[in-house]
Amino acid sequence: MTIAQLEPPPLIDCRTAASALYDFLDGRLPDSAVGAVQGHIDTCRTCASHYDFARQVLMLIPSALPLPTDSAALRERIVKSLTAEGYSESA
């Protein structure tokens, strides 16, 4: 382990973490930012909840393909998939 690995990642706020969330989940976040986002998710209950939700949504997308061209039908399929996973529209 190097000294750089012992240093904590820089602190970021919720807005910064949220704006980087999908790039983080897709593995497109620059290496220099991964530790800060992961550190924030590990310590912020609200952002951890957003992370869990976004991860679930991304896992459900393949089951929604092919995407309907009607946005109401797409919304219905997504809500149905999320409901089956235990999420509700009121949560």
Image (tube, rainbow, N blue to C red):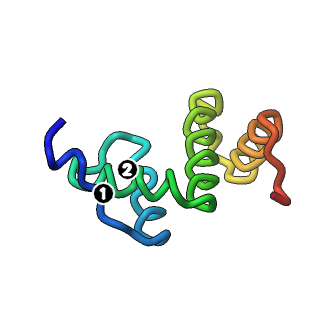
**Foreground: 26 or 73?**
26
Label 1: which secondary element:
loop
Kindly identify the amino acid type of the residue bearing the numbered disc 2: Asp
Q: Which residue is mark 1?
A: 9
Give the image location of residue 45, x and y in percent: 62, 58
Quick check: 20 left or right of 71?
left
Quick check: 45 left or right of 43?
right
Q: Quadrant of the N terminus?
A: top left
Look at 64% across and 27% down and name the residue there.
Answer: 63
Q: Quadrant of residue 11?
A: bottom left
Quick check: 72 left or right of 1?
right
Q: How many numbered marks does the figure carry? A: 2
| Label 1 crowd bin: few (<14), some (14–19), many (20+), radius 10 Å | some
**Foreground: 71 or 9?**
9
Q: What is the distance, in whole Å, between disc 2 and disc 1 at their CAs? A: 18 Å
Look at 34% across and 57% down and name the residue there.
Answer: 36
Q: Nearer the viewer, mark 2 or mark 1?
A: 1
Give the image location of residue 76, x and y in percent: 78, 46
Give the image location of residue 41, x and y in percent: 50, 54
Q: Quadrant of the C terminus?
A: bottom right
Q: Quadrant of residue 7?
A: bottom left
| Label 2 crowd bin: few (<14), some (14–19), many (20+), radius 10 Å | few
Look at 71% across and 43% down and name the residue there.
Answer: 78
Label 2: which secondary element:
helix
Look at 21% across and 53% down and name the residue there.
Answer: 32
Q: Which residue is mark 2?
A: 23
**Foreground: 40 or 85?**
40
N-terminal label among 2 and 1: 1
The tag on residue 22 is: none
Marks 2/1 in contact by CB < 8 Å: the verdict is no
Give the image location of residue 28, x and y in percent: 30, 45
Kindly identify the amino acid type of the residue bearing the numbered disc 1: Pro
